[in-house]
Amino acid sequence: MVWVNCWNTTTDSSGSKPYPSSYQVFEQFIQTVAVQVIQKSEAIAKLEDKFPWAQTTLLSKMGLYAMPDIGKKDAPIKTTLPDALHFRRAIQNVQVRDMELEIPLQPKSGKLSAAKFDDDIDFSTVQKAWWDAILTAYKYTETCPQRMPLEMRITGSSNIVMAPFRGNNLGTCSIEVLTLGVMKNAWPAYAQEVLNKWMDLKDKDGNYLTTRPHWAKEWHDFQSRQSSPAAGIVYSKCSKPGVFALAFDDGPGQYTEELIKTLNAAGAKATFFFTGTLYGCIYNRASAVKAAYSSGHQVASHTWTHPQTLDSMSVAQLTTEMQKLETALVNIIGVKPTYMRPPYLKTGGNVPTAMRILGYRMITDSIDSQDWNGLSVSASEQKFRSAGPSTSDGKGHISLLHETYATTVRDLVPRLIKWAKENNLKMVTVGSVIEPMKTKRW
Ligand SMILES: [Zn+2]
């Protein structure tokens, strides 16, 4: 069902009436209070995960039933502009979780910046946005995160200086997904997925649309286009070509200081994903940690105890794993890392949630040397040579290596340095190629 709201403007105010009528406003007030009371009750709040279909169907039906009466078909309603714009008054008092974007309407031909108000509009972007939300909702039929009707408003252009739509010469499509305010669990992932799709909309030249967030909606904890490294997100390669991120796990160990000397002599920077206890306590190898840090290598986290089952741990357990290592690094070098590599590259379960809360970017790899798996140095080296200097989409590699093997430190690393130099690859820290290090960010 679609409720379409169309108003024409006139300069003749004769015969205009308040809309909705006082009776309708009272009726809307009662509906609002009813929804609020229902949703505030604890019994209902606990039903988030129960009967998702029934709740969604009921609320959507009620939402459409509660739309204002338009009276006789084809009979015009004449009212003042503010009444027309805010035709549905009471609904704004219902507590909802809500995401809304303002998408500029695109011209059928030519550039938007040169478009005139009555040029032909290409509505295919708007249709795509609408179906993006519907298809995403259908992906989540088990939990029904969107429990209220989908909304879209098409408005004309505005040239008022501070209008958020300024420059949208053909008008704006405001599109909105919303649900009950009590939806704690199912909503964020769904809303993020819809947001990703809407922010990915492009014009016919392949450029991103200047889609903007509605300023009064819910944006906390959501991420847009993820152009900078975001906490809780997995990165497996560098963001540009011509670089090579040597990354070592499981230290500090007995060969760490030797490795640092080799790297420094070659003018290479690398990343060390240190653990707290895997090869003895990190406090007993404080000099290796300090040497890595003072030589300009990146010091990052590989958890405190290197658990095998990171992906089945609770957020509280994961927090302990991360914070114990943070404390150690703060004690030894005075800084807290913001990058981590999950042991066994386990990025599932509660790991992304915990890392998002704790502010860690998650690093995996694009080439696994398999030094941990008993592969010979020559075979490991061959993996890099056959992969080539960049990934299939032309980005620099991030390696998976272990500084805890003498063969890796003494034989494989010198070969990889040689390989990188042959290919003109700059050997860099992970943090410097996932994001420009404007501030010292470990
Ligand atoms: Zn490891």
Image: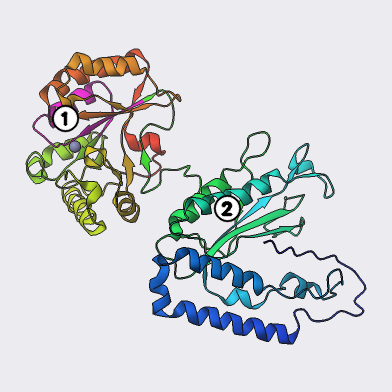
Q: Which residue is mark 2?
A: 134
Residue 102 lies in quadrant: bottom right
Residue type beneath disc 1: Glu
Q: Identify whether 300 is placed above or below 398.
A: below
Relative depth, front residue between 76 and 330: 76
Position of residue 52 measured from the top left corner of the image (x, y, whole percent): 46, 64
In percent of the image, x 8 and y 44: which residue is there?
A: 281
Is label 2's Cβ within 8 Å of ligand 1?
A: no
Highlighted range, magenta: 244-271
Ligand 1 picture quarter: top left
In what quadrant of the picture does the N terminus appear? bottom right
Q: Is residue 261 magenta?
A: yes
How many marks can you see? 2
**Colouring of the image:** rainbow
Q: What kind of residue is marked 2?
A: Ile
Question: Horizontally, is 166 left or right of 139 in the view?
Answer: right
Residue 218 in magenta stretch: no
Q: Residue at x 14, y 20 (%)?
A: 410
Question: In the structure shown, which secondary structural element does the residue marked by tag 2 occupy?
Answer: helix
Q: Circles 2 and 1: CB distance less than 8 Å?
A: no
